[in-house]
Structure formats: structure tokens, C-alpha cells
Image (tube, coloured by chain):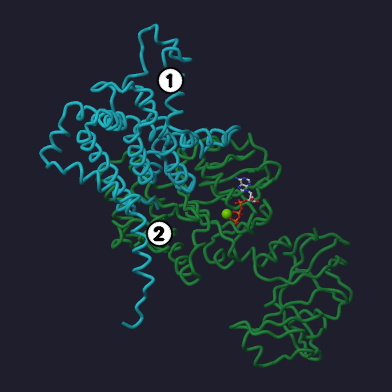
């Protein structure tokens, strides 16, 4: 064989060999173990009421955290790109901060604010308003840990957006709101969808902060990742495994969308 | 608000017609004055070209007319209505931006119909107008495409159609050919002029390309560092420049310092009569003689005939080929001064070939004086 380049198969092989024990085999084992007792058992584990509840709770709380963070991210990006004011950079840094904070610290911080003896919790608890150890706490934790994600995707697109588009729209007779709706928003479509998917993917897997603020009560405040942890601790590996497969598939689908739809998501 | 001329004290350089006028516009960015007392008007169906170097304030004037920038003082009047305080969206101007600013997520049709949709026109009325405009700018085959799928020239035509759709009170073009290559620029220029003449919309067109200005303009306004130095037809401005900047910015010009003596221009031995269309000068005024390269004739020193106004003798410095004509620089025997530039058509160069170092005498066909600053 003339011109056979040994470096190519060799380097590809080495790359896969490194990925195998670190990434590929762990993922594979979820699927292998989860289905090793037959699909029937997998299905039964998945359909357990507690499991269904945990999945639903995760989806709902992640959904609302995503809705909030996308809208806020859009709004904050608009304000911070349009207006220059004192303290602007400080706000940009603050918005980005939550990614740098360990999730357990985030959960703890929320407890110190909203918990029964927290700064604000102390004021509202006597009125019978409880936030910690409810689904609200999970949403708050999700909002906190995914706060900068949507903003981080939308802001740069906003910054590079051609200002003369908005000016053109104004000279043609559009109000600010019409311009935002017809011109600005369509240009952000890709960034919004990308930001939403990233936020949702991150929120649905959140563990560290949720375990502190939710109370981890089965069928009340137990999210899917908490369910996996609890079942594993109880020795019910199969139950834990079934949900793990679903969560893994979720991430897999979301990242496939982000990867394969990137042309569509791309903003020109 | 109705514009009442008596309330505003200005000395209009040229109010022109009533379709659109700016009166006494001034604007500073921070401490830097960018516009100083700009006055001009545009007639119905007239094309006024703003010509000026980069940074002279052309875009700023356009943005003030469109309502995208507030003047520090002065007024913008559209068809008798003072719109200075109105926001951009209430002025009804059509702006063609330098980069076209087409909406990337809208098709050609949607871009063109946008202004009408904002005005809540009936759907079939919008469709009819879009159909008519698509045909007018010859984009029938591209109506469902997105701007990114169009060539520069096509995008430009979309931008024009889009601005015309809602029958604006004035069309404002900010160097719309900037991004196109020379050949396309030239053909588009012709198309646009024809189109604008068909439409009867007052138009303001910005460029820093002199050739473009000549070809498009009914009238030219020459800007220099935020001041409007002269306004008139291209012919007037070219043949009767009033300032040194106008003279040198529009085409090449040779300048010679001098003084008025006995109502004539005088520089050492050079004495030239002044025709009545020169600016009024008093005895002893410092002036500059202005003459175009094509208005100079070179002859052998002994040969200058009576039909030319004798300037001076000199020596040929350079002879250069410039396509359809020859470009010659000559140092005149007048002590210290810059060499003058002369252009000679093919017929001249054939009859009287020149070489470097040759002695010649220069005569003028046409010249003017302007007051020295
Ligand atoms: N928003 C602004 N802030 C500060 N200075 C500005 C602003 N806009 C314009 N200028 C300044 O005003 C002056 C005139 O600008 P303008 O854009 O009107 O020039 P122009 O004649 O259109 O030039 P060009 O041919 O390069 O487009 C320039 O010196 C420019 O730097
Ligand atoms: Mg400009």
C-alpha cells in the first residue's frame, strides 16, 4: 500500500481508547445494566409512581426556570447592550457569577435567605408563606445555577446586531415595540433557542443545590437526580438506573439538537 | 407644528423649494462641532447631492433629517411641517443606509411591504404595491429570497423599493454604492437617477465621489468640515467655485496667489483681466487665481496665439499617460510656487508632443479668482 499513513488510524485509536473508560463506558453501563433484567423490568421501574413524579417535577421546575432565565436574559442583554451607565460592567460580572459558584454553596445561600430563619424567610414564614422545601425552592435553585447561560448566549448576538436595522425600522414608522418584535427578536431566534436548551439541560440535571433546598421528599419535592441518589442509597439500583437512562437520553437529545441544528440556530 | 419663517432668523444660502428644507442646523458631539449653520432646500422631484470629504458631516445631516439624531439648533421642515421635534417614525422619510440595513429574517417581499404593514394597510393593497415595486426594481425572480441570497446591487434595489413603498416625503441615500465595484456603481447610478425622476420624490444623496455627484445631482452641496461651502448645479459649482476647497475638491485645480490692481489680477508679471462674473473685489484684495488643468494650453514660447490669456513661460517637469489624455506638470518661471498641472487631449499631444525639460509658454482659456481666506 503506497502512501498508507499509519498516524491516522493510530491517533484515532488512541483518542477512542482514552474516551472509552472515561466517557463512553460509563454511559454504556447505564444502558447495559438498566436493561440487563429485561425491558419489562426497566419499564416497571420507570413507571413507578415516585419515579414518574420525580421526572415530572424535574421537567416542570426546569421548564419554569428556563422560561424565566430566557426572558430575563433577553431583557438584561437588551438593557446592557443599549444603555451605558455607571456600574454596567459590575452588573455583567454579577450576572455571570453563579456559574463560578459551587452548586452546594448556591443551595446553602438560598437557604440562608429563604429558610425559616433566613433574612427574608424570617419575614414571610409567620404569614404562612413557605418557599424552602417546596417546588418553588427547586425553581429558585434552578434559576440561580443557570442564571447566566441564556444571557451569555443572547448578549453577544445582541452586541453584534446591526444597529441600523432598528434605525431603518424606526424611519419606516415602527414603534420601539414593533421594532423589537419584528426586527430584533427574529434576529435573536437562534440565540434564544440555544440559550433555552442549554438552560434546560443544565437545570434538569441539577443536584447540589436542589438537595439542600428541596427537602428531598419522595413524591413531594424529589427531582429526578435526587431520586437516583435516594434509590441508590436504598440499594435499589434498578430503580435508580431507569431514571438515569431517561436523564441521559434527555441530554443526548438536547445536545444533538444543538449540534445538528446549528445551521438553523445560527444567527446571521 | 407649522413652520413660520418669521420666527427663525437665518440667512438662507439656498432655501430652494418647499419639499424639504433644513434651516440653521448646528450639531456638536461633545466639544467637537460637526455641523455649523447648515441651510438648504430640496424641491419636489429634485436630487440634491451632498458632497464632502470623510468626516465632513454628511451622514450627520442625513440622520438629523431622518430623526435619528437631534440637532443642537436649527429646524427640519418637510412639506411645510416643522418636524424637528418629531421622532423618526413620525417623519415619513425613506432612508437607504450605507449597508442597506435589510431585515435579514424577512424575504424581499416582506422587506418591501414592512412600512405598509406598520401602517396597517389592507392586505391586497400591500400586495399590489409590493408587486408594482418588485417589478419597478426588476426583482421578480427574487421576491421570495432572503437578503443574504442577493447580490449587492440587488440588495440595494430592495432597499430603495422598501423605502419607496410607503410614499416617503423625502428619500435619503447615504452612500448607497459604497460597497459596490466601479462598473456596477456606474450602471446603478444611471438606473437610480432614471428611477428617481420617474417617482418625483425629493431626494438627498450623499457621496464623496465627485463623478457620482456630477452624474446624479440636479444640484450639488459641497460640505467642508461641517460647513456648506457652495450649492448649485454641477456645472455652476465646477465652473464657478467660490472657495479654494470647492475648487480643489471638485476636480483638479491650479491655484496662484495674487492681488487685485486696477480691477485686474496681478502676480508679478502676470496680469489678467477679470470678467464681470467674478466675485466683487476691491483694489488691493488678496485673491487666488483658479484654473482647471484642461483650461491651460501649452505652446512653444514664440507661438502663443491671441485667443489665449497669456500666463507665463515655464519648463516641463513630467509628462504622464493617463488613459484618454496626457497629464503634464509645468514649473512656471514665477519664483516659488507649486508646479501647475495641465491635461491635454490626444489631438493636442499629437500636434505638439512634449518632452521633459522643454520650455513652453502657458495660456489660459478660462479662469476665475476667489478671495483668499
Ligand atoms: N455618534 C457620534 N459620536 C461622536 N462623534 C460622532 C458621532 N457621529 C459622528 N461623529 C463625528 O462627526 C463627524 C462627522 O461625521 P459624519 O458621519 O457625519 O461624516 P461623513 O461626512 O458622513 O463621513 P464619511 O464620508 O466618512 O461617512 C466625524 O468627525 C465623526 O467622527
Ligand atoms: Mg457617512
Q: Residue B143: where, in percent of width, then height?
A: 30, 57
B46 or B257, nearer to the observer: B257
Which mark identifies residue B155? 2
According to the rendering, which colour does chain A have?
A: cyan
Quarter of the render that holds ligand 2 = bottom right
Please tell me the colour of chain B.
green
Label 2: chain? Answer: B
Estimate the x, y position of residue A195 in percent, counting from the top left: 38, 41
Residue A70 badge: none
Mark toward the viewer: 2 or 1: 1
User: Toward which corner of the image does residue A241 lie, by quadrant?
Assistant: top left
- Where residue B109 appears, as percent x and y from the top left, is 31, 52
- Residue under label 1: A111
Q: Is residue B15 visible?
A: yes
Residue drawn at x 66%, y 50% as measured from the top left: B13
Describe residue B289's horizontal placement relative to residue A204 as left or right.
Answer: right
Most extreme residue toward the left, as rendered?
A: A40
Residue A59 appears in the rendering: no
Amino acid at each position: 500500500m503506497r502512501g498508507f499513513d499509519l498516524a491516522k488510524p493510530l491517533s484515532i485509536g488512541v483518542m477512542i481508547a482514552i474516551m472509552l473508560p472515561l466517557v463512553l463506558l460509563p454511559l454504556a453501563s447505564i444502558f447495559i445494566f438498566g436493561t440487563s433484567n429485561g425491558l419489562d423490568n426497566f419499564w416497571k421501574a420507570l413507571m413507578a409512581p415516585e419515579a414518574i413524579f420525580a421526572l415530572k417535577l424535574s421537567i416542570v421546575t426546569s421548564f419554569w426556570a428556563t422560561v424565566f432565565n430566557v426572558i430575563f436574559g433577553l431583557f438584561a442583554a437588551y438593557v446592557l447592550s443599549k444603555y451605558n451607565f455607571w456600574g454596567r460592567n459590575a452588573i455583567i460580572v454579577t450576572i455571570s457569577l453563579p456559574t463560578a459558584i459551587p452548586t452546594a454553596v448556591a443551595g446553602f445561600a438560598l437557604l440562608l435567605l429563604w429558610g425559616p430563619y433566613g433574612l427574608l424567610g424570617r419575614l414571610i414564614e409567620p404569614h404562612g408563606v413557605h418557599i424552602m422545601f417546596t417546588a418553588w425552592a427547586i425553581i429558585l435553585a434552578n434559576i440561580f445555577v443557570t442564571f447566566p447561560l441564556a444571557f451569555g448566549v443572547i448578549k453577544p448576538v445582541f452586541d453584534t446586531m446591526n444597529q441600523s436595522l432598528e434605525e431603518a425600522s424606526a424611519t419606516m414608522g415602527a414603534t420601539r415595540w414593533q421594532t423589537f418584535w419584528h426586527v430584533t427578536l427574529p434576529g435573536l431566534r437562534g440565540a434564544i433557542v440555544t440559550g433555552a436548551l442549554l438552560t434546560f439541560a443544565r437545570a434538569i440535571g441539577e443536584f447540589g443545590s436542589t438537595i439542600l433546598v428541596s427537602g428531598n421528599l419522595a413524591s413531594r419535592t424529589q427531582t429526578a437526580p435526587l431520586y437516583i441518589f435516594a434509590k441508590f442509597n436504598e440499594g435499589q439500583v434498578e430503580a435508580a438506573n431507569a431514571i438515569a437512562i431517561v436523564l441521559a437520553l434527555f441530554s443526548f437529545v438536547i445536545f444533538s439538537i444543538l449540534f445538528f441544528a446549528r445551521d438553523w440556530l445560527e444567527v446571521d | 407644528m407649522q413652520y413660520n419663517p418669521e420666527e427663525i432668523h437665518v440667512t438662507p444660502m439656498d432655501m430652494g423649494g418647499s419639499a424639504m428644507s433644513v434651516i440653521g442646523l448646528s450639531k456638536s458631539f461633545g466639544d467637537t462641532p460637526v455641523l455649523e449653520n447648515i441651510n438648504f432646500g430640496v424641491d419636489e422631484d429634485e436630487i440634491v447631492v451632498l458632497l464632502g470629504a470623510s468626516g465632513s458631516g454628511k451622514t450627520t445631516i442625513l440622520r438629523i433629517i431622518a430623526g435619528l439624531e437631534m440637532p443642537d439648533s436649527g429646524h427640519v421642515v418637510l412639506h411645510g411641517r416643522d418636524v424637528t421635534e418629531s421622532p423618526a417614525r413620525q417623519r415619513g422619510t425613506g432612508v437607504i443606509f450605507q449597508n442597506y440595513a435589510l431585515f435579514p429574517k424577512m424575504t424581499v417581499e416582506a422587506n418591501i411591504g414592512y412600512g405598509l404593514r406598520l401602517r396597517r394597510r389592507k392586505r391586497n393593497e400591500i400586495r399590489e404595491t409590493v408587486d408594482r415595486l418588485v417589478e419597478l426594481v426588476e426583482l421578480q425572480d427574487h421576491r421570495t429570497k432572503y437578503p443574504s441570497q442577493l447580490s449587492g446591487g440587488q440588495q440595494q434595489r430592495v432597499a430603495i423599493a422598501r423605502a419607496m413603498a410607503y410614499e416617503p416625503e423625502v428619500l435619503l441615500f447615504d452612500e448607497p454604492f459604497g460597497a459596490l465595484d466601479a462598473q456596477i456603481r456606474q450602471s446603478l447610478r444611471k438606473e437610480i437617477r432614471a428611477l428617481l425622476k420617474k417617482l418625483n420624490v425629493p431626494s438627498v444623496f450623499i457621496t464623496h465621489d465627485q463623478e457620482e455627484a456630477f452624474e446624479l445631482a440636479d444640484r450639488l452641496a459641497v460640505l467642508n468640515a461641517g460647513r456648506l461651502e457652495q450649492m448649485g448645479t454641477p456645472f455652476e459649482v465646477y465652473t464657478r467655485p467660490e472657495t479654494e476647497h470647492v475648487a480643489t475638491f471638485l476636480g483638479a485645480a491650479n491655484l496662484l496667489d495674487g492681488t487685485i490692481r486696477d480691477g485686474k489680477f496681478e502676480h508679478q508679471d502676470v496680469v489678467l483681466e477679470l470678467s464681470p462674473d467674478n466675485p466683487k473685489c476691491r483694489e488691493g484684495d488678496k485673491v487666488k487665481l483658479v484654473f482647471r488643468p484642461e483650461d491651460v494650453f501649452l505652446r512653444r514660447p514664440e507661438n502663443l496665439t491671441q485667443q489665449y490669456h497669456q500666463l507665463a513661460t515655464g519648463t516641463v517637469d513630467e509628462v504622464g499617460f493617463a488613459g484618454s489624455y496626457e497629464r503634464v506638470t509645468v514649473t512656471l518661471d514665477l519664483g516659488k510656487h507649486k508646479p501647475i498641472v495641465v491635461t491635454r487631449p490626444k489631438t493636442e499631444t499629437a500636434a505638439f508632443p512634449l518632452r521633459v525639460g522643454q520650455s513652453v509658454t502657458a495660456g489660459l482659456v478660462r479662469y476665475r479668482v476667489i478671495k483668499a481666506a
